[in-house]
Image (cartoon, grey):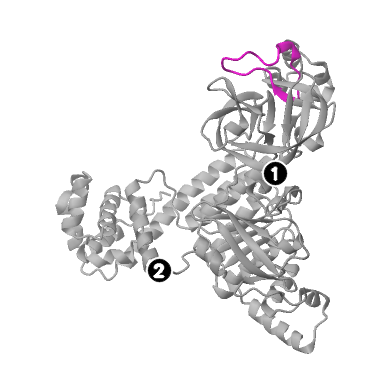
Amino acid sequence: MDRSVPADINAERMTLGSILLERDAIVAVAPWLPPEYFYLEKHAWIYEAMLACYNRRVPPDLSTVADELRRRERLDLVGGIAFLGEISAEVPTAVHVEYYGRIVERTATLRRLIEAGGKIAALGYDEREELDLTLDKAEAELFQVSQRRAGQDFVHIGQVVDTFFEQVTTLQERRGEVVGVPTGYTLLDEITGGLQPSDLIILAARPSVGKTSLALSLAYNVAYEARGTVGVFSLEMSRDQLVQRLLAMHTGIDTQRIRTGNLRDHDLQVLMEAMGTLSDVPIYIEDTPGLSITEVRSKARRLHAENGVDLLMIDYLQLMSGRRSDNRVQEVSEISRGLKALARELNVPLIALSQLSRAVEGRQSHVPMLSDLRESGCLAGETQVYLPDEGIYRRIDELVGTSGFNVLALNTETWQLEPRPVLNAFATGFKPVFQLMTRLGRTIRATANHKFLTIHGWKRLDELQQGDRIALPRQLPGPTQATVHDEELALLGHLSRTGLYKQNVSRERAARLASVVQSKELQALAQSDVYWDEIVSIAPDGETEVYDLTVEGLHNFVANNITVHNSIEQDADIVMFIYREELYDKETDKKGLAEIHIAKHRNGPIGVVPLRFEANTTRFQNLERYRVPEGY
């Protein structure tokens, strides 16, 4: 049976005619009806011209729209002024413009559904992809249709400027108000303007400092006070534990008394009333442990489609699972990129909690820094970084503050060295270092948590021992000589499983072996740029200023003729740390005081927000006038 593509040409003409007839009619449809919803191209062009007039605050009538089409060299293509007059004359009144526009929207959505169905069918026939990834892509196609979000390619800057002008106008009208999702914390909202749509916010702290409590306080404020819908992924605590904390925050009753049932009659009455109140608060909890980024994305899309979401929260980042990988740093990086993509897709702020490294405990100042958020380590300032474009070495401390230059990175899929750009070169503080030396005499000074590539994947320096083998570049492209001769090449993969890597097998012999066993992996290794050198010593070597690089994509680089891991640049728009001095100094006069350090703010200022922390209810509150809480 022949089926025509869903389209209502008459509704398109009536929509355009209504706008031409009554200049204010476009106000009713402009916010939700984009040009690509029109089936006929010439109708889309006319509507684009109308929107251009509207965004310039020019009434979109017959004359102005014709002028705009003429300026775009499209007037004759749509049929000239005669066609504009024709569709204008067909409409007796502009009162029903929204009705006609909704028909245009409906048929466009049906066309996009058909298109999505075709893409999903194609995904189903492609057996090369992993099932989870295929399902995620299929769900994303349907979600775009359900959210009325047409995919688009390039957008002319004029459209972006027009949209931004509307935002600036709105902000001007709402000057002094919180324009994002209000957190309930006055100073925090002043710095951030509220939590902004599509932002990824990392909230990090050491264990037992209160990151879950602050996250729940934020969720409570958004849902209870601002009536915003909050989705909470709790990978650490059960939903019952979260509800107990929320009840303590709402009632002011000690969490331990709620947990044990040690309640007075008055407390019980207050608690029962609070249960009734909280049962209507728009907070949705998902407490399945070990969720993957694919599962989180799927559940978040479903929640957003069914209830709408103003804020998403994940507790916490390191408990999520990524794709199977022997490199946890890259796995966490993949998860953070996925969360940022989710925030953009749903256009909501997303708060992800994160654990800080032990480096906070090992220095005199316990105030967290951005380097504490990273899972990789640092290198001493004299470390020589190879720059392939120039064929020279530069000290890592001389690179601080620069970016855009290339380093050599090892692609562990092809085992070849590739130039990759550096996104950031930075100092990370004064830290203890160790000197590592290999059989060939290569040395490097690094912190205990810096990672090196071994035959079993990336390992921290403090996990290595004498006799382990680490990756060195066999040769460096550029005006330098080979760093390792062919006869010194050793192998990974098949060779390591058979023990042959210990024999420093030559490239020629490895290639012959690969041909005999018909191993593609072994063939790649035989042609690799890697030599596996033996560690002969690891020894403490004092304290010094240390540094690191952020390398795009492969996350490693050649330094001191050794392949080393780099720091993962966070995808977060905002990074916040919790610091409570009372945890380190029992005699401090800042008992009950918590400092929220905004260490990174991509689109605004950084700063410190003092809050009052009530330990008995685990709630964070605005610091109106500091006083020592009861019980301290």
Who is closer to the viewer here, 437 or 286? 437
Whole-percent x, y for residue 561 in the image: 68, 23
Disc 2: CA contacts within 10 A as few (<14), some (14-19) or many (>=20): few
Who is closer to the viewer here, 150 or 604? 604
Give the amino acid type for the residue marked by disc 1 in the picture.
Answer: Glu
Give the labeled residue for mark 2.
174
With 581 as the anchor, is 102 left or right in this view? Answer: left
Give the labeled residue for mark 1.
375
Q: Check disc 2 and report its element: helix, strand or loop.
A: loop
Quarter of the image where one finds residue 94: bottom left
Q: Check disc 1 and report its element: helix, strand or loop.
A: loop
Whole-percent x, y for residue 131 in the image: 65, 44
With 567 as the anchor, is 440 left or right in this view? Answer: right
Residue 479 painted magenta: yes
State whether residue 324 appears in this view: no
The dominant secondary structure in magenta is loop
Q: Where is 353 relative to 490, above or below?
A: below
With 64 as the anchor, is 215 left or right in this view? Answer: right
**Residue interval drawn in magenta:** 471-492
Give the amino acid type for the residue marked by disc 2 in the picture.
Answer: Arg
